[in-house]
Image: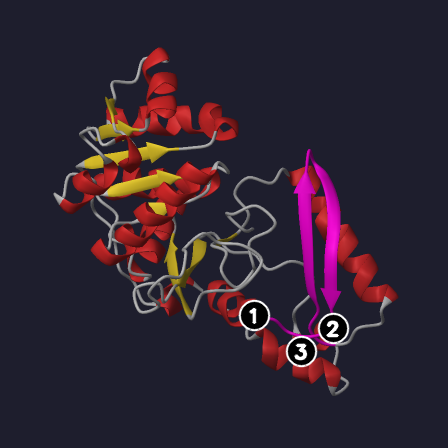
């Protein structure tokens, strides 16, 4: 399951296995569609199927009769060498003969996080979209989703804070969804900073917040100044489409890259990150060799 919504390139998306937010009914439909497509296309070997879910309805984006970059990640996560099995099937053996029938069973969580080259590519905006920007990936694995997510995030170079300041500036469409996450960050002891529109919404809903001004307003405090002084340790910024906000957002994201401050540009990414921070603050994160999970 991709953490980000459809529209972010699959090579850039954060992925989790098994799915965390999809209902059992929808998963049954996903498996049903997968079987129907594979059989109808008479595929022997690997098939890459991309599906999107909206309001519990499943849409098929594309099907490719080949492996994908996700195969090594899934193979490591479930302990089954999928490429080797697919090759044997293509050469005439059956899954039944190979002892692999049905859906793989496992009791841990694996998260794939992408590694981005933004620090080296001066001027490139870090907003994710349909064009792939990542140059590598890492995997976090644990019995607990939050722990697996935290391991993946820090392995990808995101210095997730366990305390400090969080700067929040989101579009109007995201204000309702971001509220419970910001409340949770406040309860964990983080200082919340936000732009005028976002801070008004948060304050009206009982979250103590410090208002931060846009650069063009020439009023202190502004986000870039706070970032340079080390008072902001995490940024939640979902893009808005007015020219001023877009310019400020770009400047802030570039500075965040240069100062190595983790930034989140989707509500779903923020939700996963808050879950990871909550688990990390509990301590006792275990490091185990991957073979011990299988």
> Residue under circle 2?
65
Residue 178: give x, y in percent of width and height.
42, 29
Q: Give, as a single range, the part of the protein colored magenta.
A: 45-69
Is any atom of residue 268 visible in this view? yes
Q: Is residue 248 above or below residue 37?
A: above
For the residues labelled 3 and 1, say whether their Cβ atoms are less than 8 Å apart. no
* Quarter where residue 288 is shown: bottom left
Q: Main secondary structure of the magenta part?
A: strand
Res 147 seen here: no
Measured along the vertical axis of the image, is residue 170 above or below residue 246?
above
Q: Residue lying furthest bottom in this view?
A: 91
The reply, left or right, for residue 44 in relation to residue 202 is: right
**Left-right relation of 93 to 125:** right
In percent of width and height, residue 48 lies at: 68, 66
Sequence order check, earlier mark of 2 and 1: 2
Q: Are marks 2 and 1 in contact (CB under 8 Å)?
A: no
Question: Which mark is drawn over residue 86?
Answer: 3
Q: Earlier in the sequence, mark 3 or mark 1?
A: 1
Residue 95 on image: x %, y %:
71, 73
Q: Secondary structure at mark 2?
A: loop
Q: Which residue is mark 1?
A: 71
Residue 141's x, y, as percent? 38, 57
Q: Could you tell me which residue is drawn at 44 percent across and 56 percent down?
A: 110
Outermost residue toward the left in this view? 229
Which numbered disc, 2 or 3, marks the residue that appears first in the sequence? 2
Q: Residue at x 36, y 39 (%)?
A: 236
Element under disc 3 = helix
Q: Is residue 136 left or right of residue 23?
A: left
Q: CA distance from mark 3 to mark 1?
A: 11 Å
- Between marks 2 and 3, how big is the CA–CA gap? 11 Å
- Identify the secondary structure beneath mark 1: helix
């Amino acid at each position: 399951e991709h953490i980000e919504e459809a529209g972010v390139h699959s090579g850039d998306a954060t992925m989790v296995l098994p799915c965390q937010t999809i209902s059992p009914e929808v998963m049954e439909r996903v498996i049903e569609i997968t079987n129907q497509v594979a059989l109808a296309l008479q595929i022997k070997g690997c098939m890459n199927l991309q599906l999107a879910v909206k309001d519990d309805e499943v849409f098929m984006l594309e099907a490719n009769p080949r492996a994908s970059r996700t195969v090594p990640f899934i193979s490591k996560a479930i302990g089954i060498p999928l490429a080797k099995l697919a090759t044997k099937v293509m050469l005439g053996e059956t899954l039944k003969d190979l002892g692999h029938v049905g859906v793989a069973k496992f009791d841990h969580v694996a998260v794939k996080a992408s590694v981005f080259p933004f620090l080296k590519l001066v001027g490139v905006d870090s907003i994710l979209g349909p064009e792939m920007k990542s140059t590598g990936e890492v995997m976090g694995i644990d019995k607990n989703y939050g722990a697996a997510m935290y391991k993946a995030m820090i392995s990808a170079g995101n210095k997730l804070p366990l305390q400090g300041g969080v700067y929040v500036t989101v579009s109007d469409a995201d204000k309702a969804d971001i509220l419970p996450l910001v409340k949770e960050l406040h309860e964990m002891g983080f200082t919340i900073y936000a732009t005028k529109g976002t801070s008004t919404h948060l304050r009206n809903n009982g979250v103590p917040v410090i208002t931060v001004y846009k650069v063009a307003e020439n009023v202190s405090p502004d986000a870039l100044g706070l970032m340079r002084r080390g008072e902001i340790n995490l940024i939640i910024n979902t893009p808005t489409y007015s020219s001023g906000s877009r310019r400020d957002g770009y400047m802030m994201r570039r500075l965040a890259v240069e100062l190595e401050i983790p930034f989140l540009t989707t509500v779903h990414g923020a939700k996963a990150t808050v879950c990871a921070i909550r688990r990390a603050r509990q301590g006792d994160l275990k490091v185990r060799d991957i073979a011990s999970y299988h």
